[in-house]
Amino acid sequence: MFDSRLVQIIVGSLGETLYMVGVSCGLAVVFGLPIGVILVITEKRHILENPCVNQVFQAVVNIGRSIPFVILMVAIMPFTRLLTGTSIGTTAAIVPLTIAAIPFVARMVETSLREVDPGVVEAAQAMGASPWEIIIKVLIPEAKPSLILGVTITAINLVGYSTMAGAIGGGGLGDLAVRYGYQRFRGDVMLATVVILVLLVQGVQVLGGALAKKAEHRRS
Amino acid sequence: MRLESISKAFETDSSRVIALKEVSLHVAPGEIFGIIGLSGAGKSTLVRCINMLEVPDQGKVYVDGTEISALGSRELREVRKKIGMIFQHFNLLSSRTVLENVIFPLEIAKLPKPERARRGEKLLELVGLEDKKDAYPSQLSGGQKQRVGIARALANDPKVLLCDEPTSSLDPQTTRSILRLLDTINKNLGLTIILITHEMEAIRQICDKVAVIEDGKVVESGRVIDVFISPDHETTKAMIRGSSHIDAPDWAIEILEASAKASDRQVVRLSFVGESAGRPVISSIARDFGVDINILTAQIDHMKSVPFGVMLVELSGNSGGIEKSIDYLRRLGVSVDVIDDISDFVTKENGGANL
């Protein structure tokens, strides 16, 4: 159905998508996890209660979550150029993807850590654990299955966002679908990209589910 | 250990709830000290004030001579390592195995790794769970979880063990075995234990002293035996009655009612403790004072290891004889309660009598 050149292009696009999603998801976790932790531990009656810090972070996360991705992508172009030296291309697309995903990850982390039994935190405090030890040894390990599922959802969202990144020359499967499938009337290419995207999302979901299950020691 | 007029209030948006009002307690080393109260009485808040999980608004807390309430957070964490705590809902880490849970406090105390595992295994042996070390908490029963909790609380060789309703979510049989374990630990390790509970049964089984707390205040305290024999406060009386009731047969009700009217008959409750339980007091009353004794119901139990008997008897004879008998019994150290109002004993639902 496809000649080898087209196959190469599809594989290349898949690689670009994986690259964008993988790197931005990783970076979003690196920045989003601490923000999520701060959102939880500064809450009332938590280990480092601090209403001021909490409100500031709540506001920042809410603002970040409310900007539509397409607008964000364009709006932060100067910042993107500053970081990557260009505002076009796959690497440049990672910047808006990451920035869009950080507040999302922070909310996911917040929800996961809230589920941790306050009694367990109290027990750790009673043993003389410091706030840092409680975060590293109690909150995060106890929330691990839920955190893994949160990262899975984030990755899947990023697959969706990454197709929009095609608009700024980000490449990837979305870009391919638009340029070949839509603009050149190649329905078969369109269908192929959609099938690959479906499989990709399925794969991420199955993998995330399996990892979460492996980390789960509570009776389900 | 000493608490000096601890007060604590919780603020909510609309109101201010006073949890503790000037509570003072003194707990001697090696003692098992029970704190009993109904839910909402403030007992859990009180025990949390001992290791500053709740910071009291007023008052001072001393543990082992150190004023805990004056420490900074770093020093407080060091002191907490020497105060073990167990909980009603066990509060084990679900992501860690049994052994990993037990060595958690050792990690916090920065003990070297090989040492941790060795101590962990020894602690599990102490609580009888060495074969469960690689299981996860979700695979254990409630009693086993509490044993892990106890092993974990003992990891850093604490001097004090705080127990917050440790048996409240366990069945009666498991409750007894956990209480026995606490008693053994107290004896073998010389550990001071503070036991929070709402079950008089737990107090009776292992505590040396007890404080009854109601509405944030200590309403009665002292040696468990003394409190059991002659409770002063209404709440205490109600809790004791609720814990050691004997159902009297139906015919006893008629006797109770009849004696309430007659002047030559008197129903009394006799409580015997320790040596007085061993003397033939009943027969000597009958002989010396010409009083007939009808035993309506009786129960012998023990409090920690001291035998403790309760008996509901009807004395009949001339009123002088009855009075003398009661005096005589009191002189022998038997606690005598004269029952004039039988309504306390007759429970409406079953028509039986409760003692």
Image: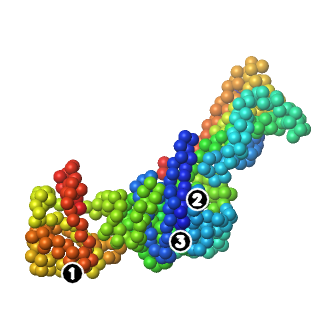
* Amino acid beneath label 3: Met
Residue B104 lies left or right of residue B193; in this view the side is right
- In this rendering, would B275 be left or right of B116? left
Q: What element carries label 3?
A: loop
Q: Residues under labels 3 and 1: Cα distance?
A: 38 Å
Q: Residue at x 87, y 40 (%)?
A: A83
Q: Which residue is drawn at 42% across and 53% down?
A: B39
Q: Find disc 1 in the rendering and name its residue.
A: B279
The mark nearer the N terminus, 3 or 1, is 3
**Labels 3 & 1 near each other (Cβ < 8 A):** no
Disc 2 designates what residue?
Answer: B58
N-term mark: 2 or 1 = 2
In the rendered structure, the answer to whether residue B49 lies left or right of residue A24 reads left
Is disc 2 in the same subunit as disc 1?
yes
Separation of marks 2 and 1 at Cα, in angstroms: 50 Å
Q: Assess disc 1: are there few (<14), some (14-19) or many (≥20) residues with their C-alpha within 10 Å of its C-alpha.
A: few
Residue drawn 85% across the image and 36% down it: A80
Residue B206 x, y percent position in the rendering:
39, 71
